[in-house]
Image (cartoon, helix red, strand yellow):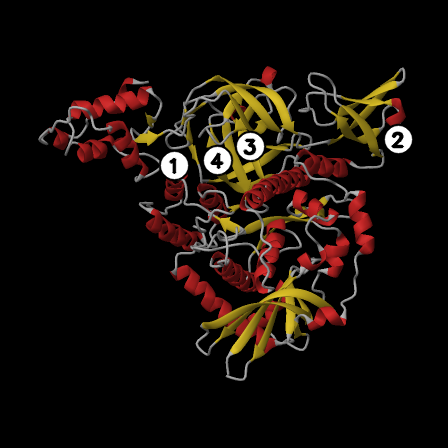
Amino acid sequence: MKKKKQFTPKSKKSKGVKKKTDAKGGGLDEKIVKYLNTKNKSGVNPDIVYAHFLKKYQEDKITAALKRMQTRQKIELTDKGKIKILKFLQSQEKELTGIIDLASSGVGYVSVAEYEKDVFIPKKHTLNALKGDTVKIEMTKFSTSKPEAVVIEVVERNQSEFLGKLETADGYGFVIPFDKSIPFDIYVPEKLYAGAQNGDKVRVEVRTWKKGKNPIGRITQLLNDFNFNEIEMQSILLENGFRLNFPDAVAEELKELKTNITKAEIDKRLDYRNVTTFTIDPKDAKDFDDALSLKKLANGNHEIGVHIADVSHFVKPGSALDKEAEYRATSVYLPDRVIPMLPEKISNELCSLRPNEEKLAFSVLFEFDKKMEIVAYKFAKTVIYSNRRYAYEEVQEIIDGADGDFKDELIYLRDVARDLREKRSKNGSINFHSEEVRFELDEDAKPISVYVKKQIEANLLIEDFMLLANTAVAKYLSKIKLSKGPRPAVVYRVHDAPSDEKLQVLSNIAKKFGHSVRFDDKEQTREALQNLMEKVDGKPEMNLINTLSIRSMAKAIYTTKNVGHYGLAFDFYTHFTSPIRRYPDVLTHRLLANQVNKEQNFYDKIELEEMLQHASLMEKKAAQSERSATKYKQVEYLKNYLGETFDGFISGVINKGLFVELTENKCEGFVPLFQMDEEFDYDEEFMRLVGKRTGKIYQIGEDIRVTVEEADIVEKRIEFSIA
């Protein structure tokens, strides 16, 4: 521990305070921990701690307690000189379980609940574990700064299928994976070649894992006709644990599904087939899982219906369809394809709320008075008939003044949505701006152009009503009481308060764009973020500030433990409105149906929590897949522009160079130091590079022109030089 980080009173005021004694110390260590737990997670100034405890304890006893706790690794002094409680192994258990991530160098990092920092695994001790595998580790170094361990068992494999090249000799073969980070080849017996020959590109499924030996597999598909794009997209999905095909058992169940809507089923439901109803989705959407309806009530009020595809009617608990949907947990959206959670017969046909077709829905029906206040709402299983399918752009034209079908209805919905949005904003909801990179692809899936998809008011209109339905369902389920036993477990979508350290980074970077922002406490931080989002709206730095703001937040997850949704400023929130593409929504539908139908068949809380943890993990993997595929397409696009110059801005600075995001198409690449015309020192405090000879400064947020030097498709790497 550096000398400057030792515990000594720094405040002159504290020395003038009358010192009181406490012979036994009175459990001072525990009292300090309890006090620190009430304060900021990023740490507390030592002066504040001394000032608080000098009312009862001598200064030397406080110092001794702090040093003792530091030695026992209960607390630490941060780089900013603040006292912080350490999340550490109280029992010093040697064996733990977690998910491993691998760096390009081959070393591993395992995330375990008992540590605040990931546990380091040396390359030679990863036991052939792959990224995303669940592993059991044995601790070899109990350290707060760099805990270390070895992998002693791979508990669950994240990936069982691989793409590679078959090499055969003397009646046996090995598949050499295309992914060079995979540390083993896969042995394939000759009888399991499935017609493949030496040198063929294949997909192989591992059937047997052997500790310390090559896994044994069987070839499932020849890939010789696949282009590099197809192999790359499949590799990305497999690496993140997604299956490329549905199991045979799912196909068999689909054959048995009854596709017609019977009179008996209609009689059980509210009939909304004669109520004006329409869907609003992206123009290229193929599944429509939500629709809106509007009708005038006899009392002069309006009823707005939020109708969601009744997926749970077709996907029954314990079925092969349900088990596969639970495993996948989410649909994955890559630039050239969708890997659906449910087969197309469900997602694009039976449950898709297509126009001019009768469909089964689960609906939330809101009654609005003349002041656009909600006076009542209810939940019901319904049968609906969509009169019109809108693309967002069509609705936006009508909102902007053009004529069109159901114009009066759309304008009323727009007005209600604006009112809902304004109320959410006043309540503290943070409006993060969303800019998504999209590609125009040719028939071979090669990118012709890159563009940014921006949110328009038509997008917001749909989002407003989906948020309204989700909160209504969450509040309702949270208040359910059964005649016997505890409250039923509920699916929550939660979002905890942001990280103080990351907020400080955001504040520093915002200043470089001329935006002064302070983050003092939980409520003030929400307001400060709101104001910052408004200031950067439409400006060049918007995407960077938005990204950093989102990164400062805790990750939104699914859980049975409700801590509210910080970003949206909701005390109760769940996911109900997208059961075609999210499994937690299917679970919520079942929980709500149990109550609406007066049933008491709820999920066990422990079982439900495990399902939701898996859903959160698969959501994270889907995001990783989407990022990797987007990066690949950006590299593929810029490969056509080697030697050309673009405008951009510095989006990141490290000691090895600059990250630059191009203004025109949001492609991000790296300017390594060797591409620069002098030597630079890295100023970590201000995250900038300073020229040793000229004093030239490069820092986040600055405009810059760069030339495309390299676009490496295999490594998914873009390299720039400064123009």
Which image quarter: residue 202?
top right
Residue 670 tag number: 3
- In this view, the residue in front, 348 or 54, is 54
In the rendered image, which residue does mark 1 sit on?
A: 501
Q: Secondary structure at mark 4?
A: strand
State whether residue 246 is above or below residue 283.
above
Sequence-wise, which precedes: disc 3 or disc 4?
A: 4
Q: CA distance from mark 2 to mark 3?
A: 43 Å
In the rendered image, which residue does mark 4 sit on?
A: 652
The answer to whether marks 3 and 4 mark residues whose Cβ atoms lie closer than 8 Å is no
Q: Residue at x 86, y 18 (%)?
A: 172
Q: CA distance from mark 3 to mark 4?
A: 9 Å
The answer to whether marks 1 and 3 mark residues whose Cβ atoms lie closer than 8 Å is no
Sequence-wise, which precedes: disc 1 or disc 2?
A: 2
> Which amino acid type is shown beneath numbered disc 4?
Gly
State whether residue 540 is above or below residue 415.
above
Quadrant placement of the N terminus: top left
Q: Residue at x 44, y 56 (%)?
A: 570
State whether residue 28 is above or below residue 651.
above
> Which amino acid type is shown beneath numbered disc 1?
Glu
Neighbor class of circle 2 (other Cα within 10 Å; few <14, some 14-19, many 20+) is few
Sequence-wise, which precedes: disc 2 or disc 3?
A: 2
Foreground mark, 4 or 2?
2
Which image quarter: residue 311?
bottom right
In the rendered image, which residue does mark 2 sit on?
A: 194
> Which amino acid type is shown beneath numbered disc 3?
Phe
Side of 415 where 48 appears, left or right: left
Q: Secondary structure at mark 1?
A: helix
Q: CA distance from mark 1 to mark 2?
A: 54 Å
Instruction: Decide if residue 248 is in sight here.
Output: yes
Foreground mark, 4 or 1?
1
Residue 179 in the image: state x and y as whole percent.
Answer: 70, 27
